[in-house]
Image (cartoon, rainbow, N blue to C red):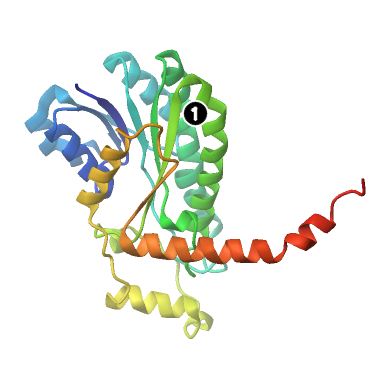
Amino acid sequence: MTTTWLITGTSSGIGRELTQLLLAKGDRVAATLRKTDALDDLKAHYGDQLWIAPLDVTDTEQVRQVISRAFDELGTIDVVVSNAGYALFGAAEEVTDQQIQDQISTNLIGSIQVIRAAIPYLRAQGGGRILQVSSEGGQIAYPNFSLYHATKWAIEGFVESVAQEVAPFNIEFTLIEPGPTQTNFGAALVSPPHLAVYEDTPVGELRRAIASGAFRLTGDPVKMAQAMINSTEVHPAPRRLTLGRGSYERVRVALVERTAVLDAQKEIAYSTELDE
């Protein structure tokens, strides 16, 4: 049975790999990206199986128009993948006001608006699946990525709430949480000028690790894309899909530590209730 997908951010990385795998298995893909010529090779090979539209997810009106046109022209869309995004790489006091705005507008507001635009169509057709690409950085944090983490933790909270709102309409969500992946990760980083005061801090250590290759990108984007495809065949939808051995291990450690801290505060938490 042919499945129809709508995917944002398909020019490279996991979005591109996902598009290629789906087309190869015979599915239809509505692919959006800022520069449509990045998919010229796939369009030449797959023809009408691939629907392409330019989209900058920071343009909310364009988001609504493109998603509306995709549903109108393709009919039912079974899976929506909100994938567009990038990482702002800098200490909190280093990044500029405009960089902060751009990061939030792309990773958080852009993702929110893609989901909001798709929901009415998914509801009208009787349901569907939404995959929101987050990150291991939606549950843990590295120094030097504070604004990136702000967007990923935020989109996870948004999805947790919206998933409950639309469950009666047979719309299901999965948060995709990859770890460092062998894509154009380093080239895609946006970074402000560095302040020397951070050189001998965890910020500087991480910068040097990334620059030297010591911060290893061990995730396979093709295997991750295939795992995302496989997840849509699981019912009910898994709320989270953690991808990568390192990602699994780091997230698990963080959750265990967080639970231990919470349990240690149980008596304090209970003590702050109103007296009965």
The residue furthest bottom is 200
Q: Residue at x 51, y 48 (%)?
A: 104
Q: Residue 31 sits in which quadrant? A: top left
Q: Give the quadrant of residue 114.
A: top left
How many marks the image carries: the answer is 1
The type of residue carrying mark 1 is Arg
The x, y position of residue 4, in whole percent, is 26, 24
Residue at 42% in and 57% down: 136
Q: Residue at x 27, y 59 (%)?
A: 219
- Residue receiving disc 1: 116
Is 124 above or below relative to 164? above
Q: Position of residue 116 (x, y in %)?
A: 49, 28
Relative height, residue 18 to residue 122 (above, below):
below
Q: Is residue 68 visible?
A: yes
**Residue sticking out furthest to the left:** 45
Query: Would you call the spot at circle 1 few (<14 residues within 10 Å), some (14-19), or many (20 or more)?
Result: some
Position of 265 with respect to 152 (left or right) is: right
Q: Quadrant of the N terminus?
A: top left
Q: Position of residue 212 (x, y in %)?
A: 28, 78
Q: Is residue 38 left or right of residue 243?
A: left
Residue in the foreground of this view, choosing between 155 and 189: 155
The residue most toward the right is 275
Question: Is 85 or 37 nearer to us in this picture?
Answer: 85
Q: Is residue 265 left or right of residue 176?
A: right
Q: Secondary structure at mark 1?
A: helix
Task: Examine the rendered structure and indicate whether residue 195 appears above or below residue 160.
Answer: below
Q: Position of residue 144 (x, y in %)?
A: 48, 68
Residue 89 lies in quadrant: bottom left
Q: Please indicate, yes or no, whether residue 34 appears anywhere in the rendered image.
A: no
